[in-house]
Each structure stands twice: as C-alpha cells, then as structure tokens.
Image (cartoon, rainbow, N blue to C red):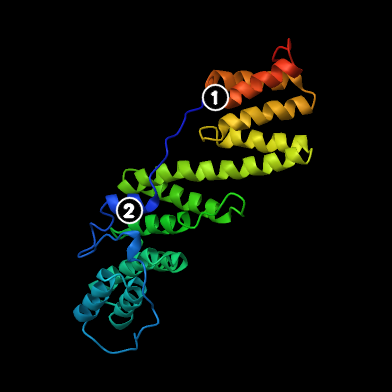
Amino acid sequence: MTIVSRDNRPSTRSRLRKTALFAGLAGAVLFTSGCAGGSADEDVAYVARDVESLYGEAKRRMDRGNTLLAAALFDEVERQHPYSPWARRAQLMSAFSYYVARDYNKAIQSSQRFLSIHPGNKDAPYAYYLIALSYYEQISDVNRDQKITEQAKTALREVNRRFPSSEYAADARLKLDLVDDHLAGKEMEIGRYYQRSGRWLAANLRFRNVLDQYDTTSHAPEALYRLTESSLALGVQEEAVKYAAVLGANYPGSEWYEKAYELVQDHAAGVTAS
C-alpha cells in the first residue's frame, strides 16, 4: 500500500473567484459569495420585450447581486425568444445565477436542461462542471447521510472523464480528493461507533474500507491504528503487528504510530507479522 499525504485544498468559492469560469460567455462576471441574494418573487410578469433589452435587464440584476431575479429574467429570455442565439446563452447564465444564489437544485436542473438541448455546445464542459459544483456545495457533515457526497463524486468524475484536459477537470480532480476524504471520514465515524459498541469485526471491516478505497486520504493513519486495536481485540495478534508495521513505515512520526507501538508492546510483544 502506498500512502501519500494530501494538502488542504482551496474552497469551491475561492477557486471560482480565481478562474474565469465564464470566459466563453459574453459579458459574464465573476461574483464573490456575498453577491448571492435577491428574490425571484419580484415582478417578472410577462411583458413582451426585445431580446437584447430583456437579456440586458437580467445582466444588470445579476451585476447588482439580485441573482434569483436575474435567473428568472434569464429564464424569461428563453421563454420569449426560444430560437434566438441569446436563448442558449441565457440558459447557462440562469444556471450560474441559481448557483451563486445557492439554489443548487435549480442550478442542476438548468444545467441539465442546457445539456439536453445543446449537448455538443462549446460551453457543455462548464455545464457539467456547474452540476458537479452544485452537488459539491451541498456535501454535509460526516455524521449525516452521504448520498449528496456520492452524487458529487459521480458528477466530478464525469467532468474528468469527458473533458480530461480542461481547467474544469483539473479542479474536479482536486475536489475528488476532498470528496474521498469526506467519505473516508464517514467510514471512520461508523467504525469508531462499532468499536465503542464492542462490534470489533464490523469495525474492522469499516477501517479496511478506508485503506482499500481511500488510502491516500488524511484518515489512513488512524485507520491503521484502529485496525491494530480491532485485531488485538479479535485475538489476531499477527494482524495487529502487521498494521502497526505498515503505520510505522508510512507515518513513523505520527501520534497514531506511537499509540499503535505501545499497544503492540503491551499486548503482542514478540509476535511476528505473518
């Protein structure tokens, strides 16, 4: 097993500020997280307007930080002028507006609609990326169900699979590391619960999952220590010595190795790993 430590990665929003995500969309602007706001309930009643004026009004609302109303107006561009070149642009701007407003479900829906109508468009990579970001932003605490985390992982992998040379794929790969770290954290939380309940075999399986699936995450050292604990509790001293040795080889100066070494000295001194 090869274990590589990972550095902390930048947040999604800081990454969003640093890259020109909408370089391919005329007139698009980057927003800080403080720009999200406004209400889509303001007056967007149907009033026939030429496409340039309607799009311009949506853009002005977006620039002012009223992102929900901007999204509704971009949607209106498509509704009133469905066959114009502006409609395609407005679809993706609507999805982006919902994302900035933190209405992630609508951002996903709008992006998926764009892809269903324009699957081969030059802005398709960004639409896939926006879907992945919208799932990623919803990743919950490790103590909660991880369905969204799995959806984020699937969407990020899709970006990397479809557009491996793009800037979006590069960022997706970084975020996949963080997603894996999060999922490993969930496995660790469940494993520790099983240990506290005396269910050592079930705990052992969870910690093994961390090493088998997430061995490059920050949770790997503790997983090796917990496997040392569980193996001793199950009476498999050779396995405990093996895990402690792997921990020492990969993390010789860590607190987890020191604790594992003490355990082995106390309960399996003289035992050789099989």
How packed mark 1 is, by other alpha carbons closer than 10 Å (few <14, some 14-19, many 20 or more), is few
Q: Give the x, y percent position of residue 91.
A: 33, 70
Q: Give the x, y percent position of residue 134.
A: 44, 59
On screen, residue 116 versus residue 24, left or right, reads right
- Residue where numbered disc 2 is placed: 16
On screen, residue 42 versus residue 27, left or right, reads right
Dot 2 lies on which element? helix
Q: Give the x, y percent position of residue 180.
A: 52, 42
Between the C-alphas of marks 2 and 1, the distance is 34 Å
Dot 1 lies on which element? loop
On screen, residue 59 versus residue 244, left or right, reads left
Name the amino acid type tagged 2: Leu
Q: Nearer the viewer, mark 2 or mark 1?
A: 1
Q: Residue at x 74, y 37 (%)?
A: 195
* 172, 44: nearer the viewer: 44
* 142, 87: nearer the viewer: 142
Name the amino acid type tagged 1: Ser
- Residue where numbered disc 1 is placed: 254
* Count of marks overlaid on the render: 2
Q: Residue at x 67, y 44 (%)?
A: 190
Q: Give the x, y percent position of residue 43.
A: 34, 86
How packed mark 2 is, by other alpha carbons closer than 10 Å (few <14, some 14-19, many 20 or more), is some
